Amino acid sequence: MAFLLLSGAGPADGQKSPLQWPVPPPGPPREPVFPRLLIDPGELAGRLKAGSAVPLDARDAGLFEKGHLPHAVLAWRPDEEVPWGIERVRALMSERGILGDKAVVIYGDREKAARLFWLLRWAGCPEVRIFGGGLVAWQAAGGALKTSASRLSPSELRRPPSGTVAVGSAWVAGSFGEEGVELLDVRDARGWDTWQTPPLFGTGHIPYSLPFDPGALLPANGGWPDPVELRRRLGTLGPRAGDPVKLESTFVLYGEGPQDPRLGLGYFLFSLAGLEVRVFPGGWQEWTAAGDHPVVRVIPAAELASLLKRENPGLDQDRHPRGLILLDLREHRDFAIGHLPGALFVPYSSTTEILSEVLAMRIEREWPDADHALPLVLYCYGSDCIRSREAGAQAARLGFRNVLWFRGGIREWRQAGYPLIDAAIPTARRVSPEGGAARP
């Protein structure tokens, strides 16, 4: 069986990397630089007096008519972006006279403001800020509100869209396990909550991505978090406790689709913390539309047992199933003591190139006629073991599209009371939840 990289993920034009822009490997920690993305009433008043800023109101039309910042224009509604695309967004900006030659200051609902922030950045605006205090802070500082709408002359944008804000599906397909890249899934309204798998992430996610809830980083009383504390909290993200991501990485966010409100929120928070961040706008909808991109799904012990029982009803045979590929990524000694029926031992390596080669060699030897659509199941010790996550990324690079992550691993299997196979004796033995051998 020949293993190929995913279509669209291979190098193009002789380039060494399929990435659309270079991602340098993480280096030593550098002194953080926090960009000035929030603007206070005093600076805003000065910018408005000088005519160097345009306020963009992210609230609804009714609130806008009751009172808004001087010279403000009302932002468009999300439904006006259909058919969706950055050129449509640029057209909506042009209609409102937002040309990128002045700073754009957004105010209103946090999620809406953050979403407009990343769209304007992508559209080519060189300076986009958020007025965090809102109208209350403006009036407290002595500022007056207006009720008459400002009208800017429509014109064509003078700058092209940014090439470093958004990435496409081909870029994402080439990033699995790439050093210096972290994919974050924002679809669930929670991240690794006590390290439990969130529901949408569990039912399917892009290989090597991590669940991330940007809303959990917002202050409960409104406003925006302190950049220093925000950066510290983002530094705790990771596949398990004590194994955080490198903040020198480039973070790529994806949601359900381009209008997922958490996309903009995540983008702004990472930007506020001075971190490199991009957005995959098409998100989960685009990734799964054609059915040819790899997907990782987290499965429980009961589902895996049901799959194995199709060919091994008693779970007492140690022959490899033909309807799926089952890989054990633990140490050889632990595999010999007890493994899932029909599992293949795969020597694990933290080096991605070696791991990919080992996976290809072992699978081709035992499943020579396997199709890339065949379910590939990975497991190791338990939910705190990240070997399955890393091997899943390499399996995706080899072309496998249906990767099943048995995240609970050997611990969950034993706790559920399913039998293990002793490598020295080719018959199943039952293992109690406490770990001792029990009678079948």
Image (cartoon, rainbow, N blue to C red):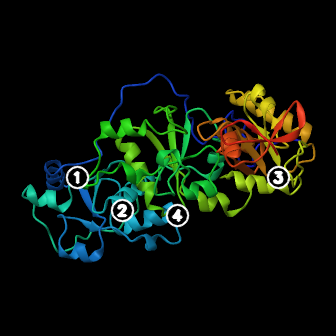
- Which disc is residue 378 wearing? none
Q: Residue at x 22, y 52 (%)?
A: 52
* Dot 3 alpha-carbon crowd within 10 angstroms: few under 14, some 14 to 19, many 20 or more: many
* Dot 4 alpha-carbon crowd within 10 angstroms: few under 14, some 14 to 19, many 20 or more: few
**Whole-percent x, y for residue 237 in the image:** 47, 39
Q: Earlier in the sequence, mark 4 or mark 2?
A: 4
Q: Earlier in the sequence, mark 2 or mark 3?
A: 2
Mark 4: which amino acid?
Gly
**Whole-percent x, y for residue 173 in the image:** 66, 46
Whether label 4 touches label 2, CB < 8 Å: no
In the foreground, 77 or 163: 77
Q: Nearer the viewer, mark 4 or mark 1?
A: 4
Q: Nearer the viewer, mark 4 or mark 2?
A: 2
- Which disc is residue 52 wearing? 1
Measure how far apart labels 4 and 2 are at the Cα level: 17 Å
Quarter-wise, where is residue 5 in the image?
top right
Measure how far apart labels 3 and 4 are at the Cα level: 45 Å
SS at circle 4: loop
- The answer to whether residue 69 is seen in the rendering is yes
Above or below, 204 relative to 421: below
Residue tagged 2: 112
Above or below, 281 relative to 418: below
Q: Nearer the viewer, mark 1 or mark 3?
A: 3
Mark 2: which amino acid?
Lys
Q: Residue at x 34, y 32 (%)?
A: 33
Whether label 4 touches label 1, CB < 8 Å: no
